Image: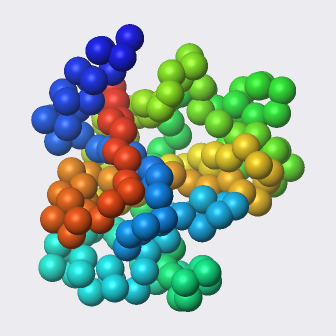
Amino acid sequence: SLGEWRDLEKHQFIKEEFAVSKVKKNKSLIGTLGPFYIPAARHEIKELVKKYDLRALNLEQEVLGSKGKLFKLSSDVKMPRCLLSYIGNGYREITDIESNWERSTVRIFNDDGYSPFILKYKKSEIEALPDFDIVMTAERIGTLGAYTHIRLPLVTQKFRKAMTDLKVRGLQYVPVELVD
């Protein structure tokens, strides 16, 4: 129920767990490039985030937006495989996340119909990763066609606080569940 979702969200944020950053609007320093929904940042943010020392943040890849030069919000660190089922065309489960991804028009996580979905990972696998404040999912998701599939950025509370301090609007944070 919605009440349980809100309780889970507060619980996860209090515990300093990770959060998915999903961009909703294109009215701030960070937005999305349609139709691909790639999170991108204006050049001003590159200087603003330096004082926060955000680990594994990569703002080097230039992309062209309608407002000029932008930078893809990304990371060189990639998450392990998510524990949620990952489904493609015909809602069949995808077991090999790298094979034939370019031919699939649909690639989504299945969280038994809950939206937004809560990604689940093994805590031990996350602890084995290099230190990060932003990391990308191993899986690509999208429903518009093969070349619109993107990896989702996952962020720590440190990243979330930096965006709050900088008054970056339009970001939605969803908890990630860690299990063992």
Residue 81: x %, y % from top left = 52, 40
Q: Residue at x 29, y 44 (%)?
A: 18
Give 34 or 159, whichever is nearer the viewer.
34
Colour convention:
rainbow
Q: Is residue 107 visible?
A: yes
Residue 71 relative to residue 127: left or right: right
Image coords of residue 62 (percent x, y): 55, 84
Q: In which quadrant will I find the N terminus? A: top left
Depth check: give the residue in front, 103 or 38: 38
Determine which quarter of the picture holds residue 30.
Answer: bottom left
**Outermost top residue:** 1
Query: Left or right of 97: which side holds 7?
Result: left
For image coordinates 68% across by 47% down, the residue present is 142
Q: Residue at left 60%, top 67%?
A: 33
Res. 100 visible in picture: no
Q: Residue at x 79, y 53 (%)?
A: 146
The number of numbered discs placed on residues in the rendered structure image is 0
Compared across the picture, whether 91 is left or right of 59 comes to right
Residue 74: x %, y % from top left: 46, 67
Q: Position of residue 61 (x, y in %)?
A: 53, 81
Quarter of image, res 133: bottom left
The quarter in which the C terminus is drawn is top left
Height in image: 56 above or below 173?
Answer: below
Q: Vertically, is 15 above or below 37?
A: above
